[in-house]
């Protein structure tokens, strides 16, 4: 397996882990009065997921 494919596989695992964390966080969100720490965690996870997906797209776009 080449280095690029290994990186893609790592990114897939990272994206899956981030998606699982986001799903868990969404399940724990209260209907009202969401604590600021949860909002911050949600924003951070969304940002990390966006970055990982962009990196994955860039790697796949250069794949031969």
Image: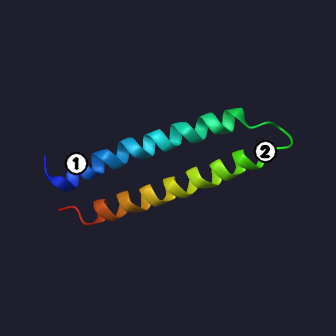
User: Residue 7, position in %: x, y?
Assistant: 26, 52
Residue drawn 38% across the image and 61% down it? 55
* Disc 2 crowd, CA 10 A, few/some/many (<14, 14-19, 20+): few
Q: Tag 2, which secondary structure?
A: loop
- Secondary structure under tag 1 reads helix
Q: Looking at the image, which residue sits at the far right?
A: 32
Residue shown at 68%/33% (left/top)?
27
State how many labels appear.
2
Q: Which residue is mark 1?
A: 6
Q: Is residue 37 shown above or below 31? A: below
Q: Nearer the viewer, residue 36 or 7?
A: 36
Residue 48, relative to residue 1: is it above or below? below
Colour mapping: rainbow
> Residue 31 location, x and y as percent?
83, 38
* Mark before the other along the chain sequence, 1 or 2: 1
Q: Quarter of the image for the C terminus: give it.
A: bottom left
The image quarter containing residue 24 is: top right
- The residue at the point 42 percent across, 62 percent down is 54
Given this view, does label 1 or label 2 mark the residue nearer the observer? 2
Q: Is residue 25 left or right of residue 54?
A: right
Q: Residue 54: which disc?
A: none
Identify the residue at the far left of this view: 1
Q: At which x and y percent is residue 34?
A: 80, 44
- Seen at 59% across and 54% down, the residue is 44
C-beta proximity under 8 Å, tags 1 and 2: no
Above or below for 48 versus 62? above
How packed mark 1 is, by other alpha carbons closer than 10 Å (few <14, some 14-19, many 20 or more), is few
| Residue linked to disc 2 | 35
Mark 1–mark 2 Cα distance, whole angstroms, equals 38 Å
Q: Is residue 18 left or right of 3 when viewed as pictured?
A: right
């Amino acid at each position: 397996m080449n280095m690029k494919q290994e990186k893609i596989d790592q990114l897939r695992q990272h994206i899956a882990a981030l998606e699982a964390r986001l799903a868990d966080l969404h399940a724990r969100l209260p209907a009202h009065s969401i604590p600021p720490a949860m909002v911050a965690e949600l924003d951070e996870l969304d940002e990390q997921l966006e970055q990982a997906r962009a990196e994955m797209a860039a790697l796949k776009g250069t794949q031969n």
